[in-house]
Amino acid sequence: MTMVDGSRAVYGLRGLLADAHRIASLAVGWPPAECALLRLLYALGLRVSGLEEMSGPDRYELLEQGRFDPGLVEGYFARYAGRFALFDPVRPWMQEPRLPSQMDAVVKSGRRAGQVDRRTSGIGKLVVSRASASSSAWFGAFHDGAPVPVPAADAVLHLLTWLWWGQGGPQGPARTTAGHSARHAAVGPLRGLVSYHPTGRTLYETIILGIPDTELTDVGRDLAPWEADELPDPDGHPPGVAGPVSLLTSRAQHALLLVPSEDRQAAQDVYVAWAWPAALPPVMDPYLNWLEGSKGQQYPQRAKVGRAVFRDLDGLLLHRPPGSTRRRPLIMDAIHDAPVAVLDHVGVTAYGFEQDRERAGGERGWYRAVTPAVLRLIRDEETANAGRLAAVRERAELCADRLVWAVDSVWQETAVPAGGERADRSPLGERALAAYWPAAESAFWLLLEQRAWDKAVAVFGQLAVGVYDRLTGEITDGHEPRTVRAVVRHRGKVASTLPRKDTVATTAATDGKAA
């Protein structure tokens, strides 16, 4: 963890809560697992605050309190002593201890008759970046023939990743219960999505701001997995959300069990199976950005590696337009009237894992993006400034579109042979976006800090023209005149994004070069 004084420290769950006011932020290094851990900390934070549900006045009182009560933290973990052990033989944390009895088989004939055939998935299945079964090895020389155990500290992160972001479809050996036998599981609740979280000056502020105000409908059923006296009945009706704790901790579609090494310091194998025969009832996740489809339906925003987080900022801050089903994350509604003294220092952290939701595999990359302190703009009196963000973002996207249009046109005219196949996006277009968006994001935050909305047209236009000139300069040096002519001709597409006086000046300069 990163401490307020800049140092680093390692914590367990109990220590994280006890010292949350001294910790600046989590530093897990694995964004999907950090997102899952943060959701668990919200639930634990609610429990050790002594509350059953969160309201606006409760939130403000806790923010003023400044830290969790050490006595309440100790009392909670004492009450559930033994329920937080990763390799506990009876109730391993966030795992299903019955999987061996439901998946293993007894060999009935041959030399191994009477022996147990363990139907595990192989440790490679646990680690998303490792190959398992017949998959290709992309990130290291790992294969099931020579399994490499995963240290316990890493194994718990991969466990959390599976519970929230796990793939759907066949999981390996079948899990057989009294009423169901299958290999397939539904996708994890966050698979392929991006999750947005308010981020304060300390982990304590981050936890308190992130606890949702979900309605508590049944105190007895609003439990975390480690709080329940009995293990869940996999043949029973999939549980609905009974309150904030069950929403935050009990939405997994997968059941896993880590097999410890002999010294119990690492996981050497894993069982992976379905948790419920059917998908859990849908809920409105409070940290997802809900978009509007062509037929007016709501759907959560998908994660996309490389997408600048500022492009979604106005959608996170503003209420939905009248008549639209689009809406910002519910957590933003919950904190929009928090004290200004707090919101002045609160930003947003986005956790995304670009994956294929419809099929197994398809992991393309994960990311964690942090904004400056922008959530003051969520207050009603800042609505006008928040609305201007949309105009600035639209201008940045217009310049990006014109830039790609221009460089793709140059590429098609100069690099594609006559009669050759024309791709929708050229390699030059991909390079243009890779150069433009990081610079545009830095410029956006500066414009926001200065409230210099009127400079957006010039700033993003100049960035786009600069990227165009730099990239096309690489292909015009020493090349034939037709390439130079194509570069000059299509430059107007991106130069048209500049203010009028800048457009005239840049065109004159280009004409001089062409001559």
Image (cartoon, rainbow, N blue to C red):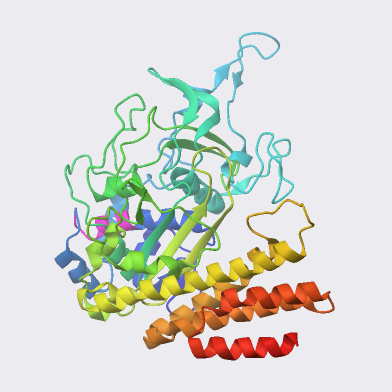
Compared with residue 503, is residue 236 higher up or lower down, i.e. above or below?
above
Write the start and end of the magenta stretch as one range. 42-51
Residue sitting at the far top: 109
Magenta stretch: includes residue 206 = no
Magenta stretch: includes residue 43 = yes
Compared with residue 251, is residue 465 higher up or lower down, i.e. above or below?
below
Question: Which residue is more in the foreground, 502 or 341?
Answer: 502
Q: Residue 308: image x %, image y %?
A: 50, 67
Please report the residue visible at 36 percent of the width from the left and 49 percent of the height from the top: 293
Q: Residue 459: image x %, image y %?
A: 50, 84
Compared with residue 106, is residue 48 higher up or lower down, i.e. above or below?
below
Asked whether residue 258 appears in the rendered view, the answer is yes
Does 10 sit left or right of 425 as displayed? left
Prevalent SS, magenta region: helix
Please report the residue visible at 37 percent of the width from the left and 44 percent of the height from the top: 83
Q: Residue 277: image x %, image y %?
A: 39, 27
Question: Which residue is more in the foreground, 289 or 482?
Answer: 482
Q: Residue 41: image x %, image y %?
A: 35, 57
Does 138 sit left or right of 285 as displayed? right
Question: Which residue is more in the foreground, 459 or 286?
Answer: 459
Q: Which part of the image, by quadrant, shows the C terminus?
A: bottom right
